[in-house]
Image: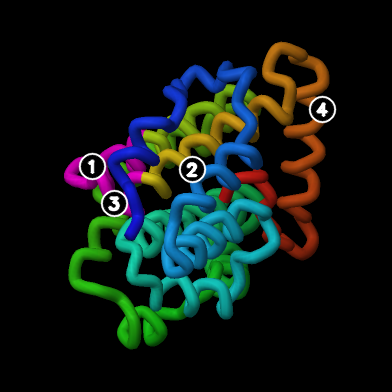
């Protein structure tokens, strides 16, 4: 049996300031998995898989939507909705209204709604973006400061993770919530948040790789999910 109380009590405190320089996510994850059942290890591996920036395809979403972990389903449905909003924002900025609609339809991220119907649980509607969420994200996407935009988006995700797990205290979703936030922290550590020039250059490279004006190839790689 999993000792959730012990695992959660032993987790380090991390902050939304993304300055936890002693964080060793690989080591922490390994220590957590040593105390988990095979089922929970599989849940952790699936959840972490989405943070490598290459797994967010139709097959991954089908697997996610079958997960027994509520947070796994909610987090990646949220990711899908955010990323589709990014497609819409980029297309609207780069193309005429008619062409933008075509690009949005072409490059929006799977799964399609019929896949939702097969697997989504009733509570998964919490991942849908509210009117306030949409306003917040539109404000974020219109931010001309790349670093500010990325930090605001990660702050938004952080708060959503907190909201999704308000009632999760000693279960696998509480652990996954910690890992999700730790991935956000690790992302900024990897970008060297105290080295402004390095951070700016890397983020610019990511944006250039994300938006191709001629094709609008949308390949998100935020090292988080």
User: Element under label 3?
Assistant: loop
Cα distance between the residues tagged 1 and 4: 39 Å
**Label disc, if present, on residue 171 of the rendered structure:** 3
- Residue 127, compared with residue 19, is above or below; it is below
Q: Which dot, 2 or 3, sits closer to the camera?
A: 3
The residue under the point 56% across, 61% down is 45
Name the colour scheme.
Answer: rainbow
Residue at the front extreme, as displayed: 1
Contact (CB < 8 A) between labels 1 and 3? yes
User: Element under label 2?
Assistant: helix
**Horizontal side, residue 74 vs residue 194: left or right:** left
User: Element under label 4?
Assistant: helix
x, y (%) of residue 34? 53, 51
Q: Which residue is the site of mark 2?
A: 179
Contact (CB < 8 A) between labels 2 and 1? no
Q: Which residue is the site of mark 1?
A: 169
């Amino acid at each position: 049996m999993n000792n959730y109380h012990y695992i959660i009590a032993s987790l380090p405190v991390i902050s939304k300031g993304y300055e936890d320089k002693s964080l060793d996510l690989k080591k922490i994850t390994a220590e957590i998995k040593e105390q988990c059942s095979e089922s929970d290890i599989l849940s952790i591996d699936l959840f972490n898989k989405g943070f490598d920036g290459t797994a967010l395809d139709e097959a991954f979403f089908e697997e996610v939507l079958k997960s027994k972990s509520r947070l796994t389903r909610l987090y990646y449905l949220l990711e899908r909705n955010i990323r589709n909003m990014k497609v819409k924002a980029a297309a609207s900025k780069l193309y005429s209204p008619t062409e933008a609609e075509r690009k949005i339809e072409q490059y929006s991220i799977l799964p399609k709604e019929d896949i939702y119907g097969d697997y989504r649980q009733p509570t998964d509607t919490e991942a849908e973006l509210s009117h306030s969420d949409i306003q917040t994200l539109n404000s974020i996407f219109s931010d001309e400061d790349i670093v500010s935009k990325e930090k605001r988006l990660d702050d938004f995700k952080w708060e959503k993770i907190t909201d999704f797990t308000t009632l999760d205290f000693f279960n696998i979703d509480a652990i996954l919530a910690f890992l999700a936030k730790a991935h956000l922290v690790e992302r900024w550590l990897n970008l060297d948040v105290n080295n402004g020039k390095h951070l700016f250059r890397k983020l610019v490279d990511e944006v250039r790789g994300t938006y191709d004006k001629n094709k609008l190839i949308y390949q998100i790689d935020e090292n988080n999910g």
